[in-house]
Each structure stands twice: as structure tokens, then as C-alpha cells.
Amino acid sequence: MFDLIQFSSVGEFLNMGGYAFNVWLVYALFALFFSVNLTYPLIRKRQIVLEQKRRLILNKEIVPQNEDNNEVENLTFRVGEGT
């Protein structure tokens, strides 16, 4: 296999027989897309976890207030009924 691929120098290898721009551009694009496909899901997972933590904290703050409001609403409802 290596008998078919022969370059006399590193410069000739980098030149890729006159197609260096196309070949190296494809390698660069592959590396870019590959790295994005590896990192974006990790970043997105972190964002989702942080959002869920934020919502959990907000819900813990809101629930006690709603429980107090429900008691007040229940008292108002009972007074309005005349019971």
C-alpha cells in the first residue's frame, strides 16, 4: 500500500500534487465539525442542568408562598360562604 503513496519530500506531501488547498480545507472542516459535534452536546447538557437547578430553586421559593396563599384563600372562601 505504501508503495503507491510516495512523496520525495515533506513539501511535496503538503502540496498534495497541486490539490493542497482542497485537501487541507477538507481536513480542516472535518476537524472543525468533529470538535463541534463533541463539545456542543456537553455544553448543552451543562446549560440544561443549570436551568433545571435554577427552576428547582425558584420552585422551592414559590411553593411556600403558594401554601400560605392557599390558606388565606381557603379562609376567605370559608368566610364568603358564611361558614
Image (cartoon, rainbow, N blue to C red):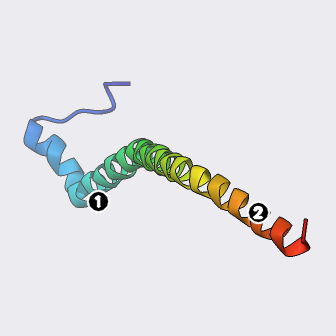
Local secondary structure at mark 2? helix
Secondary-structure class at tag 1: helix
Residue depicted at 43% across the width and 41% down the height: 42
Q: Which mark is residue 75?
A: 2
Q: Relative to residue 47, is residue 55 drawn left or right? A: right
Badge 2: residue crowd in 10 Å (few <14, some 14–19, many ≥20):
few
For the residue pair 32 and 74, the one nearer the viewer reads as 74
What residue did someone put label 1 on?
22
Spot occupied by residue 50 in the image (x, y as percentages of width and height): 43, 46
The residue shown at (8%, 43%) is 11
Q: Residues within 10 Å of mark 1 (few under 14, many from 20)?
A: few
Q: Earlier in the sequence, mark 1 or mark 2?
A: 1
Q: Is residue 74 above or below residue 58?
A: below
Residue 62, percent across and down? 56, 55
For the point 22% across and 48% down, which residue is it? 16
Image coordinates for residue 37, horizontal then vertical, percent: 44, 47
